[in-house]
Amino acid sequence: MAKENGNGEQQYGADSIQVLKGLEAVRKRPGMYIGSTAENGLHHLVYEVVDNSIDEALAGYCDDIRVTIHKDNSISVEDNGRGIPVEMHPTEKLPAVEVALTVLHAGGKFDKSNYKVSGGLHGVGVSVVNALSERTEVIVKRDGFKWRMAFVRGQTVKKLEKLDKARDTGTLVRFKPDPEIFSVLEFSWSTLADRLRQLAFLNKSVSISLKDDRPDEPKNETFFAKGGLVQFVEWLNRNKKPLHPKPIAFTVTRDEVEVDVAIQYEDGYNENIFTFVNNINTHEGGTHLTGFRAALTRAINEFAKQQGSLKKEDFTLTGEDIREGLTAIIHCKVREPQFEGQTKTKLGNSEVEGIVKQVVYDQLRTFLDEKPAVGRAVIEKAVSAARAREAARKARDLVRKKSGLEGAVLPGKLADCSLDDPAMCELYLVEGDSAGGSAKQGRDRQFQAILPLRGKILNVEKARIDKILSNEEIRAMITAIGAGVREDFTLDDVRYHKIVIMTDADVDGAHIRTLLLTFFFRQMPELIEAGYIYIAQPPLFRVARGSGKKEEKFYAYDDKERDEYIKRLSNGEGRGTVAVQRYKGLGEMNPGQLWETTMDPGRRTILRVTLDDAVEASKLFDELMGDEVEPRRLFIERNAKYVSHLDV
Ligand code: 0RA
């Protein structure tokens, strides 16, 4: 490695040049290794290190992993595994631990016998984390001693040293992400907690804890699930009413693929299937999901036929009917997974489809034979979903945009704009008739349309599609947007390329905003993907001094800004006292004020909603469903959070 000569210059040997090339490649194109250098990439560093500990747990040597967010935003990951080997590596002529931390793709080199089923999305190894960190420290307990070494931006700065005696074994990796690489350096508790909780459910009997040392009062949570996926499904359904008390669950290995599944129906109307391969969340699905769906549809339809349940009905149950209210986790372990798709989270291995299909079908048939009452409850629900599907088709015809000269009949409450190029047009969805009135007067009618929404719109997470489509506020939105809904939705028909949600800056406003986001997420996700949905940012305060022509005024969007303006005006020359008005709702602003603060493209701030925000909104919903007070408090807390994550 790098040695210093007398002049303070560094000298490199042949092997260290190899290492430097690897480091350089990672630092030059970090995105290739960790996806991005923003929030996701930053958190990926943690997952990468934790995955190594999970591998050690899967090999049967580790059952405790502790993650700490330190005050300086460095992270440490400590486990009680065997410890990274410290002996000389036979070919690299460096301690094995140094090879693991500095040589690209050195991850699984030592121990080929236990195949690696973990590994992050990119599965790139700790050397990448090291290369992208300002500083890394590794402490190993192994062979009766404690060992330590340190690195700066991936390069060894402290060679392996032997410290005190140690009886137990384990590894601690502490790293501080490099500000030269990352645009965001602050770790998010909830992002890390969500992933670690997930890992604990996926790897039963491994205890994973997360500690946050940044606040004055440190936060600490331990995730541990002896019941594995069963507990995962129960947790997902914690605020719902299950149709059967115990999840259906099985783990079967067939042709070297392990298939681990847990299923529980609840009385809602959505489908929530989460799939994983080797601990990786396969967001885009793939062959395991396809196999699972086919098996479920076949098993339930055959059982229904056998029970004579469909005699009176002249339709068959579709997959969609059968998945209404379904919560399921599918976790497959595959030796050589192929990941495809835009985000490389879609399983491509074709052999897995047949394996999962056979396993799930066999297991479900056995289960249904043993517990026919559960089967009958599922069929009853699927049959009513099928009836609703029929009713929804009829309702959808009513809101479907008519083609050609006929045109769609626009809702009466809509104040449309005069331009008709969708790329230029904006639709404001405004909470309440009074704010709607101000918005209509204050807008630029050339390109801004206003649709006032009365009160709370329907909770779409709690209603079935036919009911959703018969709700007046929702129909008004669908016809105004003009592009249909769900499978009939056509992005090219959208009448406005900016759809701006404008609600009061209070809890009710946040609630309505969440409802609307959930609606778009469930019924028109393409709108969010296209980046057409925005959130308006009305000011919270008006700070003014003087009156009439001499009045000096500022609008403030938070407490800090308000205080700054108060200070500025108090120190100024003007006469009179500083007046602070707090806007409790949009309705308190006159049309002119609404225009200059919230609607004028030259002065307003609007936040573009991302798909992640919408997923977050729909999660918030689940939390609100229960009768408890805690979810409501959490809602307020998290709502404040997710809005700050939006892109301007
Ligand atoms: C290679 C071989 C062995 C353990 C590990 C790597 C290992 C790596 C990490 C990374 C974080 N925690 C870890 N724990 C273990 C096994 C060597 C042996 O046979 O004892």
Image (tube, rainbow, N blue to C red):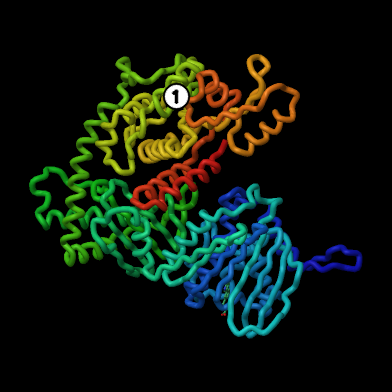
Secondary element type, mark 1:
helix
Amino acid type at image mark 1 = Ala
Where, by quadrant of the figure, is residue 99 drawn? bottom right
Relative to 610, is 354 above or below?
below
Where, by quadrant of the figure, is residue 97 drawn? bottom right
Residue at (17%, 51%) from the top-left corner? 380
Relative to 606, is 299 above or below?
below
Ligand 1 under 8 Å from disc 1 Cβ: no
Relative to 404, is 645 above or below?
below
Residue 590: x and y in percent read 51, 20
Residue 124 appears in the figure: no
Residue at (60%, 23%) from the top-left corner? 602
Please indicate whether residue 120 sits to the left or right of residue 255 in the image: right
Residue 67: x and y in percent read 56, 65
Please indicate whether residue 368 sits to the left or right of residue 106 in the image: left
Crowding around mark 1 (Cα neighbors within 10 Å: few <14, some 14 to 19, many 20+) is many
Relative to 334, is 80 above or below?
below
Q: Residue furthest right?
A: 7
Residue 487: x and y in percent read 32, 36
147 or 72, which lies in front?
72
Numbered disc total: 1
Q: Which residue lies furthest to the front in this view?
A: 576
446 or 578, which lies in front?
578
Residue at (42%, 37%) from the top-left corner? 508
Residue 268: x and y in percent read 28, 48
Quadrant location of the C terminus in the rendered image: top right
Residue at (11%, 52%) from the top-left corner? 309
Q: In which quarter of the image is ligand 1?
A: bottom right
**In this figure, which residue is indicated by the disc labeled 1?**
435
Quadrant location of the N terminus in the rendered image: bottom right
Residue 49 appears in the figure: yes
175 or 117, which lies in front?
175
